[in-house]
Image (cartoon, rainbow, N blue to C red):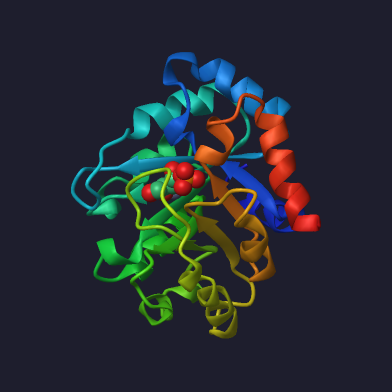
Amino acid sequence: MRRNCLANLADQSPAILPSMLLCDFGRLADEIDRLKDAGTQVLHLDVMDGVFVPNFTYGMTIVDAVRRLTDMVIDVHLMMVNPEKYIQQFYAAGSDIITIHAEAVEDARPVLDRIKELGAGAGIAINPPTPVSAIAESLPHADMALVMSVNAGFGGQKFDDAVLEKLTEIRALPGGSEILLEMDGGINPETIKKCTDAGAQLLVAGSAVFKQDDYGAAIKSMLGRVNA
Ligand code: DX5
Ligand code: ZN
C-alpha cells in the first residue's frame, strides 16, 4: 500500500479515521475487526513521547502489531521531538503515512523528503497556535497537512473553531492545491460538518468512536452530518 494509498484516500474523502489512542489494547484484534466492519479504511495511531507533549503513548512495536492484524492504511501521527531519528523504524513497522509536527523540527523539508524516499506518505502537522506560514515552505515536500483542532497531547478535548480558516490558507499556498487535508481533535457529530465545509478530507476521531458501543453507528452518524 504505502504512499500510493494517498490517491485512493483523496477519492474516498471525507473519511473518518479512528484514533487508536482510546481503543482497548487488551483486545486489539477485536477492536480492529470492529472498525473494519464499521467501514474503516484508515487507522490513526498517535505516538507521544512525553517530551513534545505532556503525555506518553506507544511506539513502533504497536504499529507493527497493528500492521500484522490488518491491511488497512496506517496513518502514524508522531508527536515527538527528533522524529527524524525514528522515521526508518516507523516505516519498517508498517506505517503507510508518517506525519511529523512542524514545531518539533528545525526544518521539516528533509524529514518529509526522507519519509517519501522510504515509500510512505509524508504529513506535516501544526498545533492550533502555529500559523500556516510555519509550513508554507514544507508544503511542496508533503503529501498531507494535518491541522490540529486541539493542542496535541490528549483525546477528549474541545474543538477549536479558530483553526478552520487554516485549511483555506493552505490550499492557496504553493503545493497546497494537491495536498490531502487532515483534521484531528474534538471531531464529533456536532463539529464534523464545519471541518468538511472548510475543506478537510480526513477526519480523525477518538472519543466520538470509542466512547460509543456501536462503532459503525458512530461513524455513520458523523458522515450523515456531512451530507446533511
Ligand atoms: C490528540 C491526538 C488525537 C486524539 C483525538 O493529540 O492527536 O488523534 O486522539 O481524540 P478526540 O477525537 O477524542 O479529540
Ligand atoms: Zn492524532
- Which residue appears at 65% of the width and 49% of the height? 189
Task: Compare residues 184 and 64 and report the one nearer the observer.
Answer: 184
Classify residue 39 as left or right of residue 22.
right
The x and y percentages for residue 188 are 59, 48
Q: Residue furthest right?
A: 228
Viewport quadrant of the N terminus: top right
> Against 21, is 106 above or below?
below
Classify residue 213 as left or right of residue 67.
right
> Against 185, is 92 above or below?
above
- Which residue appears at 35% of the width and 58% of the height? 151
Classify residue 227 as left or right of residue 120.
right
The quadrant where residue 72 appears: top right
> Against 29, is 136 above or below?
below
The x and y percentages for residue 129 are 33, 71
- Which residue appears at 53% of the width and 81% of the height? 169
The x and y percentages for residue 205 are 55, 44
- Which residue appears at 68% of the width and 49% of the height? 15
Visible in this render: residue 59? yes
